[in-house]
Image: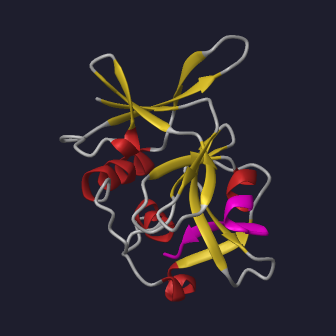
C-alpha cells in the first residue's frame, strides 16, 4: 500500500513557470522515512494508495481521507504515468480530464466535454472545480475536492501533485469564480 500524507504546514513553492504558490506538501512514507513526494522520482509499482491528512488540534494526529475509488484510481494513473516526467502537455486541466474519465483534449474544446455550473456551498469528495474569471470564459485552474477544505491538483504544465485550499488557489492563479465541473455524458 502506497501511503501519502498531507502536511499540516503551508509552504510556498515555485512552479515550473516560475510562479510562487501556497500548498500543503505531500509526503510519502518509505520504511519509516518521510520523503517529499515531488522530490522522489522512482515510486515503484503503485497499485493502491491511502491518503491521510493531519489534524493540528487538539493534538497533531493522522486522519485517513476517504477518497472516492475513481479519484484514487486516477491518482494511481497519474503517479504511474506522469509523476516526475515533466510532461509539459500534462497540466491541471489534463489532470481534471484524467479524474473525470474524459479523453485528453485541448482546453478550447472544454465546453464540449464539461458542463459547468456555479459552485455549491458544499462539495462532495471527488467533485471537480474549475477556477475561472467572473464571466466564466477564461480558465485559470482545475482541482479535485478531497474534503476538509482541501483540493488536489497538478500545478502547471509538467507539475507534480499538490494540495491547497480554495482561497490560496484563487489568489495564486488570479481566479475570480469557482465552478463545479461535471463530465458531459
Q: Residue at x 75, y 76 (%)?
A: 133
Q: Residue at x 58, y 40 (%)?
A: 24
Residue 49 is drawn in which quadrant? Answer: top left
Side of 171 where 15 appears, left or right: left
Taking depth in this image into account, of 117 and 162 the one nearest to the observer is 162
Taking depth in this image into account, of 159 and 163 the one nearest to the observer is 159
The residue range painted magenta reads 171-185
**x then y, percent, for residue 76:** 32, 48
Residue 115 lies, with reference to residue 34, above or below; the image says: below
Residue 140 lies, with reference to residue 56, above or below; the image says: below
Taking depth in this image into account, of 156 and 146 the one nearest to the observer is 156
| Residue 96 lies in the magenta-colored region | no
Of all residues shown, which one is farthest toward the top? 59
Q: In which quadrant of the rendered image does the N terminus lie?
A: top left
Taking depth in this image into account, of 110 and 166 the one nearest to the observer is 166
**x then y, percent, for residue 28:** 38, 31
**x then y, percent, for residue 118:** 76, 68
| Residue 172 lies in the magenta-colored region | yes
Q: Residue at x 34, y 55 (%)?
A: 78
Amino acid at each position: 500500500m502506497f501511503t501519502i500524507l498531507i502536511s499540516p504546514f503551508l509552504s510556498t513553492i515555485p512552479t515550473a513557470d516560475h510562479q510562487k504558490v501556497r500548498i500543503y506538501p505531500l509526503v510519502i512514507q518509505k520504511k519509516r522515512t518521510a520523503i517529499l513526494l515531488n522530490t522522489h522520482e522512482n515510486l515503484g509499482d503503485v497499485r493502491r494508495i491511502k491518503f491521510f491528512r493531519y489534524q493540528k488540534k487538539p493534538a497533531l494526529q493522522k486522519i485517513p481521507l476517504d477518497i472516492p475509488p475513481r479519484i484514487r484510481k486516477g491518482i494511481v494513473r497519474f503517479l504511474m504515468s506522469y509523476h516526475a516526467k515533466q510532461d509539459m502537455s500534462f497540466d491541471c486541466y489534463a489532470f481534471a480530464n484524467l479524474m473525470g474519465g474524459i479523453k485528453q483534449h485541448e482546453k478550447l474544446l472544454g465546453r464540449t466535454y464539461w458542463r459547468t455550473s456555479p459552485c455549491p456551498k458544499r462539495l462532495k469528495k471527488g467533485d471537480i472545480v474549475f477556477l475561472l474569471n467572473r464571466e466564466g470564459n477564461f480558465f485559470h485552474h482545475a482541482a479535485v475536492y478531497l474534503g476538509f477544505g482541501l483540493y488536489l491538483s497538478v500545478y502547471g504544465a509538467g507539475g507534480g501533485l499538490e494540495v491547497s485550499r480554495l482561497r490560496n488557489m484563487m489568489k495564486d492563479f488570479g481566479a475570480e469564480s469557482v465552478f463545479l465541473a461535471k463530465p458531459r455524458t
